[in-house]
Amino acid sequence: MGCRGLWDLYIHGKRYRLCHPRGRITYPDDIFTLQTLREPLDKPDFLEQWEVVPCPSPLNTSLDYVYTVDHDAGLFTISMWGELNGSLAPAVTLFDLTEIYNATGVSLEKVRQESQFSFRDNVIETEEIESKLLVLERLDIQLGMPTPLNELQERFFADFVFQWRFYIDDPLTWTYSSSAFKIFCIAVLRLAAWDFEVVFDDPNAELPISFKSIPSWSYSKADIYWFHGYLVVLQEDIRSASMIENAISQAKAYTDNLDTRHDIVHLILLSPHHVIFA
């Protein structure tokens, strides 16, 4: 069957992808892999074969590798499957981009030995400090019995989970600073609100359930925005009371700067791993 994968490129603030229709790619220790890495760095203005994408590509179960060339950060990343506690999980190996550019080859054994199963997000952590500015009260919501899904809702939900599970499982794509997180937030909000339209512009359009699928949701690049009367706040972490208070303080500063005053503002706080309603 050969090796399957794709390339991601981040250069001058833009993200690109190089993907063969059948996912064909060379192994990390193949000389052609280094040639492919060097081409966009040597000729950044000639990227006709690369397609512009809104977010990084996750490691799909049908792929062996995802190669990421991050020119702006000076990193080359190889994502692959590894064994963690008896199960397969996405792992990443990081290289200095300059060193790998000047190398004569990549050792496949080194790639496997230096792989890691967690990728630390490049964000400033919120300090654990006791704050007396805000008094948090428990939000009491009386939820009724959920209604059964109709066939259309079930298919939307199944396709949604199938596509996004790979982004959430991949430590390289599922971070607060990744655009994939912001796209996911608006996607899940619109799905929950049943806020979208069905168009028939392309009768031959494929379902977004393959490794080539790219999320096409329009999204806000801001961390605070309104959605159906709720103020949505995105934050790297909301596990502790101080982090929640920090998000609420940001929301308060945001509403105080608006011309229209809101007596009551309902919040939806979202992080890569938690959601809070306030």
Image (tube, rainbow, N blue to C red):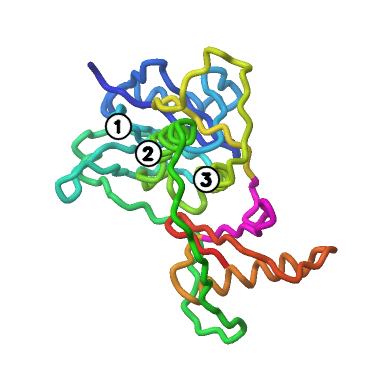
Crowd tier of the residue under label 1, counting other residues whose Cα lies within 10 Å: few below 14, some 14–19, many 20 or above: some
Amino acid type, residue under disc 1 in the picture:
Thr
Say which of marks 1 and 3 sits in front. Answer: 3
Crowd tier of the residue under label 3, counting other residues whose Cα lies within 10 Å: few below 14, some 14–19, many 20 or above: few
Tell me what residue is drawn at x 57 percent, y 18 percent: 48
x and y percentages locating residue 185 in the rendered image:
54, 48
**In the drawing, does residue 46 fall left or right of residue 255?**
left
Pointer 2 and pointer 1: residues touching (CB < 8 Å)? yes
In the image, which disc is placed on residue 61?
Answer: 1
Single out the residue that lies furthest toward the bottom.
132
* First reached walking from the N terminus: tag 2 or tag 3: 2
Q: Quadrant of residue 173?
A: top left
User: In the picture shown, does residue 46 fall above or below 214?
Assistant: above
User: Dividing the image into 4 quarters, which one contains the C terminus?
Assistant: bottom right
Residue bearing the label numbered 3? 188
- Rounded to the nearest angstrom, the CA distance separating label 2 from label 1 is 8 Å
